[in-house]
Image (spheres, rainbow, N blue to C red):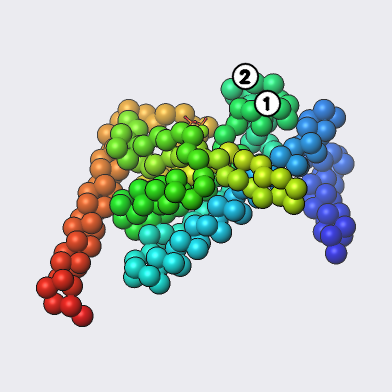
Amino acid sequence: NWSFNDGVARLSRRSPVTGEVAGERTGSELEFVRELGGLLLMHKFAVDELLTKLRIWSEEFDYAHEHDPIEHIASRIKRPESIMQKLRRKGLPVTLASARDHLTDIAGVRVVCPFVSDVYLIRDLIRRNGMEIVQTKDYIAEPKPNGYRSLHLLIRVPVHLSDRVEKVTAEIQLRTIAMDFWAAVERKIFDKSGGAPRPEFSGELKAAADAAADLDARMKGLHELKALAREVVPD
Ligand code: GTP
Ligand code: MG
């Protein structure tokens, strides 16, 4: 029962002491959040289209090539609060048009791959399958100063509605398991609000990122050795 659940959610945000609702929004902001619904839905559709393609490729490669290039996939739609925060942070008006025109990461998909070569394989599959890549940031070829590695793509995903096709921008982050491990833990230690890590930490952080890259290189070596062994002694 949805209305019951909704009621519980609202009750739990109301202070039993003052009667105030936690984080209650002002009138215009509330209107903005309502308008945002349609835009968020379009971005959810884009994520759905993308996830379906990625899952098909994952199963197809597992079946046809005995190597699944995708370890796991995560996705998220940016929350209205984060959209407002980002618009304010960038000094942009907090309007629907400004969110639509300036924010490219409302739809986000992260693809984690076993090997670095899989990252570029998925990039190629995206390009060859009707999704235009409008921006590439290759932090694998050129890691960020803190050591962050990943391939970031902005793509235009065709969303097939009942009466038209809309192209929706989505951000894809592709990385290996080792890169994902580093990024996930780094984010836990130095979240965005904390600003840049103190200089005394940054050397160690970078060294940890290099160790992750070294792991990737060693796993690649093992993978190649196994392929070679198979050629010599087919199993
Ligand atoms: P934003 O305003 O955050 O979108 O900056 P940008 O457009 O310059 O983004 P960039 O492509 O560099 O990074 C976008 C996303 O990549 C971030 O929101 C994170 O999810 C991820 N990311 C980028 N740099 C780092 C990093 O140093 N550490 C971790 N853990 N994640 C990062
Ligand atoms: Mg960005």
Looking at the picture, how far across and down is residue 158, in whole percent? 60, 45
Determine which residue is flagged by label 1: 98
Vertical placement of 131 versus 65: above or below? above
* In the image: residue 39, left or right of residue 147: right
Residue type highlighted by circle 1: Ser
Is the C-beta of the residue carrying label 1 under 8 Å from the nearest atom of ligand 1?
no
Looking at the picture, how far across and down is residue 95, in whole percent? 73, 26
Which of the 4 quarters of the picture holds residue 138? top left
Residue drawn 50% across and 63% down?
56
Residue drawn 74% across and 37% down?
36
Alpha carbon separation for disc pair 2 and 1: 11 Å
Disc 2 element: loop
Q: Is residue 184 visible?
A: no
Q: Nearer the viewer, residue 183 or 189?
A: 183
Which of the 4 quarters of the picture holds residue 33? top right
Q: Nearer the viewer, residue 57 or 181?
A: 57
Residue type highlighted by circle 2: Gly
Q: Residue furthest left?
A: 232
Q: Single out the mark in the foreground, 2 or 1.
A: 1
Vertical placement of 61 versus 213: above or below? below
* In the image: residue 221, left or right of residue 42: left
Determine which residue is flagged by label 2: 91
